[in-house]
Each structure stands twice: as C-alpha cells, then as structure tokens.
C-alpha cells in the first residue's frame, strides 16, 4: 500500500547515508525488524582475532523454513509492477519483504524469501542459503501470540538525495510503516524502518533488480502527554537510543 507517510521516522542526510551504506553489505548484517531487518546471527570473531574474541557458547539452532501458505494466509502479492521503474520495484519488494504472517512464518526471513522475485540472481542465492538463528525476537513473539499478520505502508523518503540514476544503477530510500493484525482481533505496531536499496540491471530497458538492502529501525513515536492529573505539565518524551544500522532482511531480514 502506498500512502502519505505518518509518524516519526529516523532521518539522516540521505547523501551521507547512501555513501556510508556502500561499505555495509546487506547480505552481511540483516536488520528484518522487526522490522524491517534485524540480524539474529551470532557474532563471531573477526579474521585474525585471538581465540578469546570468539564466544565460547554453542551456536543457536537455525529456524526451520516457514510452513506452506494456506488459503487463509495474509501475505501481499503486488501485481502489475513495472519492472523498468526502479521506484515501483523497490516499493513492491518492501511490501512483500515486510509482509509477515506468523501463522505460517517462523521469522521475518520467510517473507524475505517471498520477495526474491525482485532480487538479482546473486542476492537471491545468498538469501536462500542463509539460515537465521532461532529466536526472532520479542516483537515477533508478541505478534505470534496473536497469530498476527502485518501490512505496511511504503512511501518514498522525501528527503533522499542519493546518487542520480544511471542506465544500470539506481538507489532508492523508503519508509516502511507497518501494522500487526491479530486473528483474535488484536492490533498493534508492525515493522517500521527506513530502508535503502541498491538496484541494478543489465542494460537500459531491462527490469531492475534489488542487489542490496540496508535498513535502519525507525524510532517509535513518543507517547501522548499524560492527562491523568488536571493541570499537570505534559510529560516530556525521552529521546530514544540511536537506531540500529543493519543490512535489511539477512542484511535482509526485515525487523
């Protein structure tokens, strides 16, 4: 769904952001957000580091793949996407990659795999070979407790001033604002993230494909002022901690 953005997004200078993102590989860090794209893989020592830098705990078991979707599954499937329009491809990818159904999905990466139709062959292969560790996070557990699915509004980042498109290379910045819908009637906040995509194609007129994704988890909007006591001063929202920078869903798994 493409609507006018509401809420508060984490903003940085887009030109600086895109420059910084060139050194962050989406296939290396995923944030899926739970959001868009948290990386649940265990930290390991850097090459050449001493053995003491490597955690001594046993690695977590990998999540199993999601269940086959049933007729009651709520997952997006955008149609009539113009593959030669980098913006349309980016928005369709984000809609699918952040569209979870916890009745069938074990974690955000299952939705990332559904979005593989818009990946480059190399990116698709990397995501299919990635096996996220068990434990999709507290937010996912809340959604799963209600057997919820998520829907998202995807809007272009109005402040973006990334590199100009070339015939074979394009960058897009998006804001994802999601809602979780429980099968028990509950509703809650879904995935929220600023998402930056790199798209490539073989030549002019060919379809664009997503080559890399990085997401920054968006800050939750501040709570409304307290009105419990007449005349009380409005509560001052506390500033949130800096957002987590990570490559989207595995760098791609949406949060």
Image: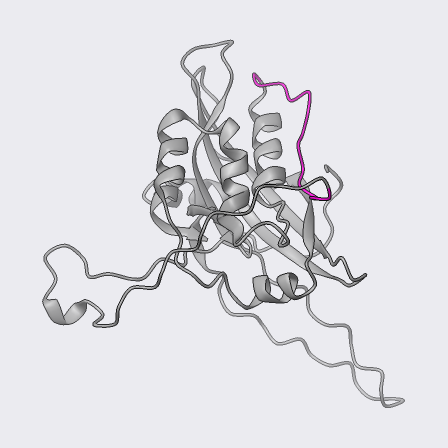
Spot occupied by residue 13 in the image (x, y as percentages of width and height): 50, 47
Q: Is residue 191 left or right of residue 212?
A: right
Spot occupied by residue 26 in the image (x, y as percentages of width and height): 39, 43
Is residue 160 visible in the rendered image? The answer is no
Inspect the magenta stretch and tell me whether residue 76 lies in it.
yes
In magenta, the rendered stretch is 72-84
Spot occupied by residue 122 in the image (x, y as percentages of width and height): 35, 29
Up-down: is 98 above or below 87? below
Up-down: is 97 above or below 50? above
Magenta stretch, main secondary structure, is loop
Nearest the eye: 81 or 171: 81
Up-down: is 42 above or below 204? below
Spot occupied by residue 203 in the image (x, y as percentages of width and height): 43, 11
Nearest the eye: 212 or 51: 51
Nearest the eye: 87 or 79: 79
Q: Residue at x 42, y 47 (%)?
A: 250
Inspect the magenta stretch and tell me whether residue 128 lies in it.
no
């Amino acid at each position: 769904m493409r609507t006018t953005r509401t809420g508060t997004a984490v903003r940085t200078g887009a030109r600086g952001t895109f420059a910084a993102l060139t050194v962050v590989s989406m296939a290396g860090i995923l944030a899926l957000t739970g959001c868009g794209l948290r990386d649940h893989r265990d930290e390991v020592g850097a090459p050449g580091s001493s053995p003491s830098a490597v955690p001594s705990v046993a690695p977590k078991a990998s999540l199993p793949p999601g269940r086959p979707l049933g007729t009651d599954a709520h997952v997006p499937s955008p149609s009539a996407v113009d593959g030669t329009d980098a913006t349309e491809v980016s928005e369709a990818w984000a809609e699918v990659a952040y569209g979870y159904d916890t009745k069938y999905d074990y974690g955000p990466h299952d939705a990332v795999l559904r979005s593989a139709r818009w990946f480059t062959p190399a990116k698709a292969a990397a995501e299919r070979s990635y096996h996220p560790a068990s434990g999709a996070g507290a937010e996912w557990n809340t959604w799963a407790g209600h057997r919820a699915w998520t829907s998202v509004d995807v809007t272009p980042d109005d402040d973006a001033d990334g590199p100009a498109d070339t015939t074979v290379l394009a960058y897009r910045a998006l804001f994802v604002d999601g809602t979780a819908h429980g099968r028990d009637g509950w509703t809650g906040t879904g995935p929220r993230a600023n998402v930056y995509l790199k798209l490539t194609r073989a030549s002019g007129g060919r379809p664009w494909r997503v080559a890399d994704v990085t997401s920054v988890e968006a800050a939750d909007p501040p709570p409304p002022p307290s009105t419990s006591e007449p005349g009380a001063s409005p509560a001052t929202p506390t500033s949130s901690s800096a957002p987590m920078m990570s490559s989207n869903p595995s760098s791609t798994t949406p949060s």
